[in-house]
């Protein structure tokens, strides 16, 4: 499989590209990339999902201001942190971010793929306001 995107978050729905209803990994970046994201693309979030369409829908909803306000729980808690902590608290700024995903086949380990992305984009510490993911089955990420 190959990377899909990047799609500017504010233009989702107008380009007729929808994430699949399968598992995969995804990134949110500040700049547009070609073929696959690189370190030059200012990736600010790496994630995984059992169902890409569902998870990315949750993130986009929050970034475009459709998440709950106040003390209510967000559908995707870390998307709230992207929205509020990375100077994207203005919906217009969040709409300028780019989203892309890579569908993962059933033969591939989604935890390992997420750990590889984490290493690629932030090898020295925390990214996504979380620690590096680990795969207990394959020992990747330790």
Image (spheres, rainbow, N blue to C red):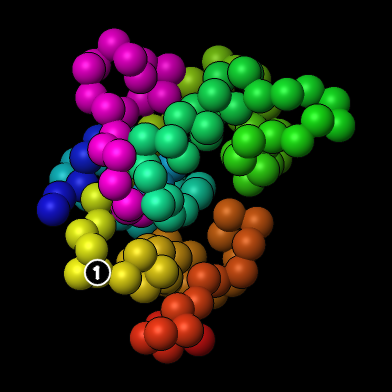
> 65 or 71, which is in the foreground?
71
Q: Determine whether 140 is above or below 23 in the image.
A: below
Which residue ends up furthest to the left in the rendered image? 1
Please give the count of numbered marks on the rendered protein: 1
Q: Which residue is mark 1?
A: 108
- Is 142 included in the stretch rendered in magenta? no
- Residue 44 is left or right of residue 65, and the answer is left
Instruction: Provide the secondary structure element on which disc 1 rests.
Output: loop
Q: Is residue 65 at least partly visible in the picture?
A: yes
Query: Where residue 73 sits: x, y (%)?
Result: 75, 35
Q: Residues within 10 Å of mark 1 (few under 14, many from 20)?
A: few
Which residue ends up furthest to the top in the rendered image? 14
> 17 or 75, which is in the foreground?
75
Q: Name the residue: 61% across, 40% down.
A: 76
Q: Name the residue: 42% across, 51% down.
A: 49
- Residue 25 is left or right of residue 15, and the answer is right
Q: Determine whether 116 is above or below 30 in the image.
A: below
Query: Where residue 5 sits: x, y (%)?
Result: 25, 35
Query: Where residue 91 sits: x, y (%)?
Result: 60, 18
Q: Is residue 94 at least partly visible in the picture?
A: no
Looking at the rendering, the stretch of residues picked out in magenta corresponds to 6-25
The image quadrant that residue 48 belongs to is bottom left
Q: Name the residue: 78% across, 23% down.
A: 69
């Amino acid at each position: 499989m190959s990377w899909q995107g990047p799609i500017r978050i504010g233009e989702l729905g107008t380009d007729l590209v929808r994430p699949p209803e399968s598992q995969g990994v995804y990134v949110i970046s500040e700049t547009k990339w070609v073929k696959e994201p690189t370190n030059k693309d200012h990736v600010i979030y790496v994630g995984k999902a059992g169902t890409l369409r569902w998870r990315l829908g949750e993130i986009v909803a929050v970034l475009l201001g459709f998440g709950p306000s106040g003390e209510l729980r967000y559908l995707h808690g870390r998307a709230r942190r992207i929205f509020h902590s990375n100077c994207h608290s203005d919906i217009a700024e969040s709409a300028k971010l780019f989203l892309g995903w890579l569908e993962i086949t059933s033969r591939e380990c989604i935890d390992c793929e997420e750990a590889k992305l984490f290493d690629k984009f932030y090898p020295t510490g925390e990214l996504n306001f979380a620690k590096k993911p680990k795969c207990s089955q394959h020992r990747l990420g330790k």
